Image (cartoon, grey):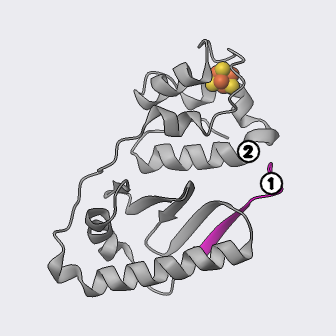
C-alpha cells in the first residue's frame, strides 16, 4: 500500500444484497447509487464504503478492528433496512452529486500543474464537470498515491463517470 498506515478491505457477503440498495439510498444521506452497475457508495466518517451485489469494499481503513466495526454496523444497517423496506419509498436516483472538494481530497494536492491546470482544486472542478480525464493527473498514478487513485477511480465510477486508460 502507498500508505502503510491504511488498509483496503474486501468483504464477501453470503447472499445478493443489491435488492436493499434503493432502500438504503432513500434512508441514508449522501449515497451514490449506480443502479445499472448495482453499486451503492456510502461515505461514513471520511471512509468510502462501496456495496456491490456480492461484496463490499472499504477504503482507507486503519486496522482490522475498524474494518470489523464498520462491517458490523453495515450488517445491522442492511438487515434493519431490509426488514423495514415496506415503510421506505425506494430511491433509484443517483442522488448525491460528486463534489469537487471530495475529489480534491483524493488528489496529490501538490499543485504541480502537470495536468495543465493551475491547482489541484481547478483540476477537481474540471473532473467533476467531466471536462478533463483523470489520467491527466500523472502524479496520481505513481506508487505514492496508489491508494488515493484507487478510491478516486471507484468514486468516479460509482457516480457513472467513464474512467479510461487507468492501467
Ligand atoms: S497534475 Fe495532479 S497533482 Fe499536479 S496540479 Fe494537476 S491535479 Fe494537482
Q: Quadrant of the N terminus?
A: bottom right
Residue at mark 1? 1
Whether residue 90 is situated above or below residue 137 in the rendered picture: below
- Residue occupying image coordinates x 50% and y 62%: 50
- Residue occupying image coordinates x 43% and y 72%: 53
Whether residue 164 is situated above or below residue 40 in the rendered picture: above
Stretch in magenta: 1-12
Residue at mark 2? 146
Q: Are marks 1 and 2 in contact (CB under 8 Å)?
A: yes
Q: Position of residue 166 (x, y in %)?
A: 63, 38
> Where is residue 68, by image quadrant?
bottom right
- Residue occupying image coordinates x 70% and y 49%: 147
> Where is residue 71, by image quadrant?
bottom right
Q: Which of marks 1 and 2 is nearer the N terminus?
A: 1
- Give the secondary structure at mark 2: helix
Q: Position of residue 74 (x, y in %)?
A: 48, 76
Amino acid at each position: 500500500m502507498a500508505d502503510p498506515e491504511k488498509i483496503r478491505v474486501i468483504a464477501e457477503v453470503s447472499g445478493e444484497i443489491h435488492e436493499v440498495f434503493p432502500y438504503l439510498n432513500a434512508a441514508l444521506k449522501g449515497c451514490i447509487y449506480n443502479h445499472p452497475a448495482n453499486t451503492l457508495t456510502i461515505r461514513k466518517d471520511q471512509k468510502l464504503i462501496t456495496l456491490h451485489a456480492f461484496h463490499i469494499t472499504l477504503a482507507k481503513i486503519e486496522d482490522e478492528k475498524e474494518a470489523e466495526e464498520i462491517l458490523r454496523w453495515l450488517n445491522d444497517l442492511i438487515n434493519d433496512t431490509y426488514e423495514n423496506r415496506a415503510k421506505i419509498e425506494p430511491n433509484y436516483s443517483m442522488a448525491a452529486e460528486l463534489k469537487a472538494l471530495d475529489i480534491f481530497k483524493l488528489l496529490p494536492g501538490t499543485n504541480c500543474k502537470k495536468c495543465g491546470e493551475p491547482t489541484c482544486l481547478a483540476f477537481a472542478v474540471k473532473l467533476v464537470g467531466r471536462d478533463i480525464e483523470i489520467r491527466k493527473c500523472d502524479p496520481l498514478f505513481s506508487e505514492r498515491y496508489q491508494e488515493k487513485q484507487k478510491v478516486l477511480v471507484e468514486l468516479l465510477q460509482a457516480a457513472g463517470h467513464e474512467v479510461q486508460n487507468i492501467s
